[in-house]
Image: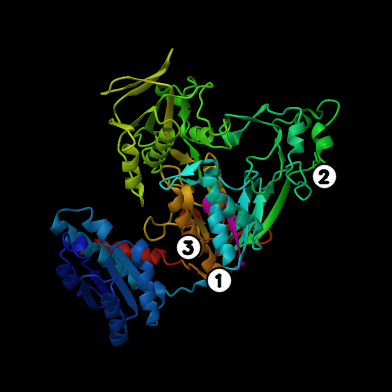
């Protein structure tokens, strides 16, 4: 056996803490090491070429590279050895950046640790075995979950590539949060003017099937072959017959008695409704929680909505429907929720009519909103408006992250107040202004030049809003009190309340802040750890509209690639079950996070789906009979590695 070892200096990342030449020299004395080299950057073209050259000239059959994280470059070096005819699983990688140089200051000790880790890898490499990756076919269809601007962009991109897309949205209309906005920063474009054409394009696209008022019930399968169960909630309206005329809503006996969620509960609607005038599809939906017929089985002496509908579209006999769809890839674009400041008593939200959230402000100033665009509180136009930023964001005891959009939408809203009421006083309490995007700093400076007062406060400084006869009094530490007619809270973005449940169904991970976790923040920002499932928009982290659209386009490319290829290779590092040793106790089946194990009632043993298995090793560790082993991590390999580390 001939082993080639390549130690990377990685500039000063490794070289500043590890004496790489010394490590390389000591490695030469290890058993079966044919060649030991170091490169300044092993991942560079010259570094990769040196490995290829040695494999060809020295007939190497095992390769060890000691450099940075395998998450970054293991696939790179596997490709290098595979190009020269060596099975990619005969390659071993050692992380001496994160595991050594970045966590140690003592160069002598760091150098010794690097040598020990590489010694273990060399010992393990002697027992590496060739593995074959499976090839699975891909269903040329995709599922996009979430019908906001990110989901719409993703669906259109994939559909334009010629593949069928199912766009599933749990609300009666697509559009998402962007549909609620009046204008967008920094260009002050009409939000609906930008969004509505894309909504219509999605609805009319021959390759997109809209499934609104629907939820994901269950997801089975693996990349290329997902089987998804979608629950279609009953609208109690036949969408084929409904023409969106609105006569039913006008006739509804409970007209104007139900809170309108789209208007942030600032207006009322009927029990039968469309969310907003530009809704897509423009089909009415009966609210089962508010309709007398659905709640009590009777609505007066006559069903006024049924009588008013000239198309006979209302059908109270509709039932919930489960639909199974088969897709090759999935993109999650479920968006976010706005932070609820009700529990932050210092702001008086929910107690004082003069205190509203930024999204409520958007609905009030929108021409299609509850006041037809007039900024009114209790019927009065405000003369003194105060904005408070970082409500629900950058809180070390709550949501520590920055929500990214609040600084700029506050600037936009402050400008809108100044534009509508030139003589008003406008004050913004801020901690830091983060104007990071294209045109953002210029817009912020423009707003400041409009005589809008920015008052800085530290995150730890107290701020309190209390009611008085004139409106409210804003008391901010380090600043004089302000009498205000209106206080607008710049609430942050938080994960949707159904994110955990959806992540469980999809077998994808969540980050510490509760958003969906990407596979790598820099190299795989739209991938998840479950192959074939991708994320886009604010379900991954707070971001503005341009960044959401950009990430949606990226996710669409990643999701469409397997569809175009028609087949994918699946990782070969999986669990393996010895049928003769399996007792059928099913302990492993309950532990598997990927549903890769299934009990065979016929054979009385557990069987494994190689495609679903991610090689985590939980089953092997728990198996009481030792029937399960991990390919590429056999006892022989692991024990050899431990022995190599301990031997000196």
Q: Is residue 311 above or below residue 578?
A: above
Question: Could you tell me residue 542's position as x and y percent?
Answer: 43, 45
Does residue 207 appear anywhere in the picture? yes
Q: Residue at x 65, y 54 (%)?
A: 210
Crowding at label 1, few (<14), some or many (≥20) Cα neighbours within 10 Å? some
Left or right position of 60 against 129: left
Question: Could you tell me residue 389's position as x and y percent?
Answer: 37, 33
| Disc number for residue 629 | 3
Residue hosting label 1: 564
Q: Residue at x 26, y 71 (%)?
A: 42
Label 1, label 3: how many angstroms apart (C-alpha)? Answer: 35 Å
Q: Earlier in the sequence, mark 1 or mark 2?
A: 2
Question: Could you tell me residue 396's position as x and y percent?
Answer: 34, 34
- Foreground disc of the pair 1, 3: 1
Residue hosting label 2: 311
Q: Residue at x 42, y 45 (%)?
A: 185
Q: Which residues are magenta?
A: 137-150
């Amino acid at each position: 056996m001939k082993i080639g070892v390549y130690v990377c200096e990685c500039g000063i990342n490794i070289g500043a803490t590890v004496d790489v030449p010394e490590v390389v020299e000591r490695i030469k004395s290890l058993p079966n090491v044919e060649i030991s080299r170091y490169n300044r950057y092993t991942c560079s073209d010259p570094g990769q070429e040196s490995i290829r050259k040695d494999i060809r000239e020295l007939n190497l059959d095992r390769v060890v590279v000691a450099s940075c994280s395998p998450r970054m470059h293991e696939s790179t070096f596997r490709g290098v050895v595979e190009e020269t005819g060596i099975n990619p699983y005969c390659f071993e990688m050692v992380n001496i950046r994160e595991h050594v140089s970045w966590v140690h200051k003592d160069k002598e000790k760091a150098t010794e640790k690097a040598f020990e880790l590489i010694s273990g890898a060399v010992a393990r490499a002697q027992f590496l075995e060739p593995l074959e990756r499976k090839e699975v076919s891909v269903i040329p269809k995709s599922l996009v979950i979430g019908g906001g601007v990110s989901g719409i962009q993703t669906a259109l991109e994939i559909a334009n590539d010629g593949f069928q897309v199912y766009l599933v949205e749990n609300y009666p209309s697509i559009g998402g949060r962007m549909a609620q906005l009046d204008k967008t920063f920094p260009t002050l474009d009409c939000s609906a003017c930008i969004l509505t054409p894309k909504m219509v394009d999605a609805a009319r696209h021959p390759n997109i099937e809209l499934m609104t008022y629907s939820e994901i019930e269950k997801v089975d399968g693996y990349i290329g072959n997902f089987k998804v169960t979608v629950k279609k909630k009953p609208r109690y309206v036949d969408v084929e017959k409904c023409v969106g005329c609105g006569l039913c809503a006008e006739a509804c006996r409970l007209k104007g008695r139900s809170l309108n969620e789209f208007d942030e509960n600032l207006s009322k609607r009927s029990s039968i409704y469309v969310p907003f005038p530009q809704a897509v599809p423009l089909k009415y939906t009966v609210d089962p929680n508010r309709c007398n017929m659905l709640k009590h089985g009777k609505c007066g002496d006559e069903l006024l909505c049924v009588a008013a509908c000239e198309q006979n579209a209302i059908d109270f006999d509709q039932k919930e429907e489960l639909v199974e769809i088969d897709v090759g890839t999935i993109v999650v674009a479920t968006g976010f929720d706005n932070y609820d400041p009700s529990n932050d008593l210092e702001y008086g939200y929910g107690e004082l009519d003069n205190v509203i959230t930024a999204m409520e402000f958007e609905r009030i100033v929108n021409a299609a909103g509850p006041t037809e665009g007039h900024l009114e509180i209790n019927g009065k136009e405000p003369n003194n408006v105060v904005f408070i930023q970082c409500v629900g964001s950058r809180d070390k005891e709550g949501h520590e992250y920055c929500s990214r959009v609040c600084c700029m939408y506050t600037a936009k809203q402050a400008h809108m107040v100044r534009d509508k009421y030139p003589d008003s006083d406008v004050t913004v309490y801020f901690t830091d202004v983060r104007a990071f995007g294209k045109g953002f700093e210029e817009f912020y400076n423009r707003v400041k030049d409009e005589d809008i007062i920015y008052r800085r406060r530290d995150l730890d400084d107290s701020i309190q809003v209390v009611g008085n006869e004139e409106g409210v009094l804003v008391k901010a530490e380090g600043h004089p009190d302000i009498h205000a007619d209106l206080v607008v809270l710049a609430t942050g973005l938080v994960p949707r309340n159904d994110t955990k449940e959806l992540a469980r169904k999809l077998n994808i991970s969540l980050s510490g802040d509760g958003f969906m976790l990407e596979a790598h923040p820099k190299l795989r920002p739209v991938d998840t750890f479950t192959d074939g499932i991708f994320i886009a928009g604010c379900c991954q982290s707070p971001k503005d509209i341009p960044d959401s659209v950009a990430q949606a386009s990226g996710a669409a490319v990643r999701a469409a690639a397997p569809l175009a290829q028609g087949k994918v290779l699946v990782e070969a590092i999986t669990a393996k079950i010895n049928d003769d040793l399996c007792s059928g106790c099913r302990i492993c089946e309950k532990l598997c996070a990927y549903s890769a194990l299934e009990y065979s009632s016929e054979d009385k043993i557990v069987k494994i789906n190689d495609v679903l298995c991610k090689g985590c090793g939980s089953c092997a560790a728990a198996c009481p009979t030792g029937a399960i082993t991990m390919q590429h991590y056999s006892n022989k390999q692991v024990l050899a590695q431990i022995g190599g580390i301990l031997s000196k």
